Amino acid sequence: MRNLLSCFDPASFTIAGVSSREERPIEGLAGVRPIPIAASAGAAGRLTTALLEVQTPLAAYRAAALARRVRACAVMGVYPYVQVIDIAERAARLAGLPFFPYLHDTIVEGTTGRFRAGAAVAVQERVFRNARRLLVMSDGMRDLYALKYGVEAHAVPHTYQEPIPDQPPETPGNAGAFWGGLVYTINRRSFARVAGALRSAHATLTLASQNSREDLERMGVMSPGTDLVFVGDRAEYLRLLQGQGLLVLALDWPDESPVHEDELATIFPTKTPEYLASGRPILVHCPESYYLARFFREYGCGLLVTERSEDRLLAACNEALRGGPQVRAAQAAALRAAGKFGAAAVAGALKKHLDDAVAEAD
């Protein structure tokens, strides 16, 4: 959201925050300081969920009062917690303003099996009923909501801020692979298979992850050829990507994860635009039915392995690291696909959705 909001005049929006500490200015958004309307316990978990639920009525009142004070024309609820989207929907009704939910995950499916998951059903019903325009993070989520609930949604994807090159890098990457981000319940088993294939290929593996080394060792993805690194800022991260021989994306099969199948099937990892714009080869390991597989097959922008086969993964890793005309073609296609996530284009689409829907209400 910071990347997306950086495309707008800071005077055009106000952020109502849920925080565990005093709010500070947001890096990259000059002069923007979130205004607290509720407190959280910090990290995601049952305590934060319970704390937010208790505060929901008061937080909604505070958010509505803030909206009136700044003369807002609409309320947008960005979904990381059911309780946060609940607060935003209530605040919009209290303030008499159009409500725009922007869902980064499915509501009901994304909370299946979690603490107080039952509350998500009622919240989703109100969100669907009262949304002036329902915004979602990917075409996969849009299609799921149309098929499963008969609800129209509009995809506003992740953003990529930097210029996108016309051609893949001329210099080859190193002889290893890279994974950025957490290894957890949506990708633990699939990534472990990729790591095993890379060991068989005698390729190095670099992880830029918040996981501890001990945690990764328990998952079986650490080995003598694996390196866990800390990346200080975005520019450093992008430089790191551009020096790799292979970038890895993976999602678990439904029988490997406690996460609902429809949530898994619609996930589009936030690191994907950065991977695409790097122009490096990308290996994708997930079921054929998932949106992630559909995207990479449609754009021809990566090496796709949709079987739980280490032999197939080994062959794909070797092919990517060797390079060649087909791999080079996939790299060029990745740069073209990255244009879908250009920050200016995504911000323009978001502004049009807001302008059109607010105009319809006048």
Image (cartoon, rainbow, N blue to C red):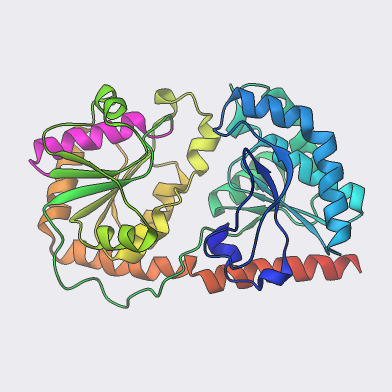
**Is the magenta region chiefly helix, strand or loop?**
helix
- 188 in magenta: yes
The foreground one among 1 and 247 is 1
**Residue at the outermost bottom position:** 166
Q: Position of residue 289 (x, y in %)?
A: 44, 41
Q: Position of residue 323 (x, y in %)?
A: 13, 60
**Residue at the outermost front position:** 22
Q: Position of residue 151 (x, y in %)?
A: 72, 47
Quarter of the image that includes the N terminus: bottom right
Left of 25 or right of it: where is 242? left
Quarter of the image that includes the C terminus: bottom right
Q: Position of residue 189 (x, y in %)?
A: 32, 29
Can residue 129 be spotted in the picture? no
Tell me which corner region of the image, top left, top right, bottom left or bottom right, holds residue 336. bottom left
| Residue lying at 31% horizontally and 26% vertically, measured from the top left | 215
- 91 in magenta: no
| Residue lying at 74% horizontally and 37% vertically, measured from the top left | 124
Residue 63, compared with residue 351, is above or below; it is above
Label total for image: 0
Left of 332 or right of it: where is 186? right
**Residue at the outermost left position:** 202
Tell me which corner region of the image, top left, top right, bottom left or bottom right, holds residue 278. bottom left
Left of 340 or right of it: where is 218? left
| Residue lying at 34% horizontally and 53% vertically, measured from the top left | 232
Can residue 236 be spotted in the picture? yes
Tell me which corner region of the image, top left, top right, bottom left or bottom right, holds residue 119. top right
| Residue lying at 56% horizontally and 32% vertically, measured from the top left | 44
Segment colored magenta:
186-203
